[in-house]
């Protein structure tokens, strides 16, 4: 039985998923790899079946949050102690996974914080990420360098305690806010990031969803 599960939400990622999963196999040979095909229109499901231990297939595209929750159910059912999440588009380096998991020795949630320097992160993402991270940090009272990073390591207790419900990218924001408010410890590890494959983040729609989530939790704090 493994102590670690890697959840990989994937949407139209047939061209990148295999490299991500292979990288995880190399860096975490004993981990359970769980891919969630979020209603892809390409061969993502077939690629996932060929290399991952478990594959969840959603009939239609629900969004990253829904895909993560589906993967977390499988991971928790497997009784793992910790869960790593990583995007399927090759943005994150799987070789850094052991570093994130090792940081769980002194934390409950570890965020793989992406560089926001000019020329590394596209300007649109840099601005929205900086604003979201600052807003989340203000609400929870601790610095959060990258509130929107999908590269994370979490103890199972964090997931068991979570009631986050968003279907898209706002889910990750709410999960983080809940964790801090629940008394869980947050840590960050800076990781390099490669921006190549098109992002499924819908700038206006998803940014609004994130803002609504932050505002809702801000209102709860005031009350």
Image (spheres, helix red, strand yellow):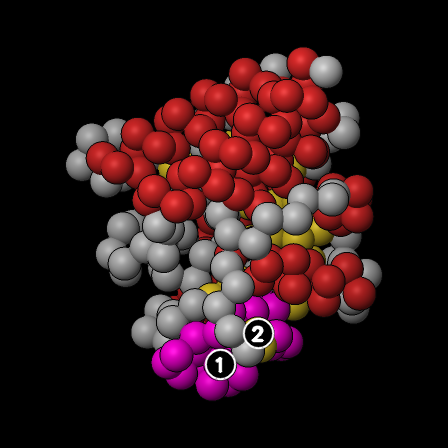
In this picture, is 196 found above or below 18?
Answer: above
Question: Would you say 61 lies left or right of 78 here?
Answer: left
Q: Can you give x and y, in whole percent of width and height, for residue 22 in the image?
A: 46, 70
**Residue 45, numbered circle:** 1
Pointer 1 local density, CA inside 10 Å: few below 14, some 14–19, many at least 20: many
Question: Exactly how many numbered labels are in the figure?
Answer: 2
Which label sits in the foreground, 1 or 2? 2
Magenta span has 38?
A: yes
Question: Would you say 201 lies left or right of 104 here?
Answer: left
Q: Disc 1 or 2, which lies upstream in sequence?
A: 1
Q: Quadrant of residue 70?
A: bottom right
Is residue 30 visible from the viewing direction of this image? no
Q: Secondary structure at mark 1?
A: helix
> Measuring 59% from the left and 48% from the top, which residue is drawn there?
166
In this picture, is 116 found above or below 64?
Answer: above
Nearest to the observer: residue 139 or residue 114: 139
Pointer 2 local density, CA inside 10 Å: few below 14, some 14–19, many at least 20: some
**Residue 124, numbered circle:** none
Image: magenta residue range: 33-56
Which residue bears the numbered disc 2?
A: 58
Nearest to the observer: residue 16 or residue 161: 161
Q: Can you give x and y, in whole percent of width and height, for residue 203 in the image?
A: 33, 44
- Marks 1 and 2, Cα distance to the nearest angstrom? 10 Å
- Image quadrant for the C terminus? top right
> Measuring 79% from the left and 42% from the top, which residue is drawn there?
161
Is residue 79 visible from the viewing direction of this image? yes
Q: Can you give x and y, in whole percent of width and height, for residue 78 in the image?
A: 78, 66
């Amino acid at each position: 039985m493994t102590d670690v599960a890697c959840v990989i939400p994937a949407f139209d990622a047939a061209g990148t998923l295999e490299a991500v999963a292979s990288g995880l196999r190399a860096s975490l040979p004993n981990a359970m790899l769980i891919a969630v095909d979020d209603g892809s229109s390409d061969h993502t499901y077939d690629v996932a079946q060929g290399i991952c231990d478990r594959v969840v297939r959603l009939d239609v595209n629900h969004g990253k949050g829904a895909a993560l929750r589906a993967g977390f159910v499988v991971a928790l059912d497997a009784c793992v102690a910790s869960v790593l999440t990583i995007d399927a588009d090759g943005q994150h380096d799987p070789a850094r996974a052991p570093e994130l998991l090792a940081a769980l020795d002194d934390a409950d949630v570890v965020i793989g914080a992406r560089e926001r320097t000019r020329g590394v992160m596209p300007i649109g993402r840099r601005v929205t990420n900086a604003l979201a991270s600052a807003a989340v940090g203000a609400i929870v009272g601790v610095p959060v360098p990258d509130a929107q990073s999908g590269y994370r390591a979490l103890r199972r207790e964090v997931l068991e305690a979570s009631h986050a419900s968003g279907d898209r990218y706002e889910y990750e924001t709410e999960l983080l806010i809940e964790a801090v408010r629940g008394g869980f410890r947050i840590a960050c590890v800076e990781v390099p990031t490669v921006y190549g494959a098109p992002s499924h983040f819908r700038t206006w729609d998803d940014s609004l969803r994130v803002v609504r989530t932050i505002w809702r939790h801000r209102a709860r704090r005031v009350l």
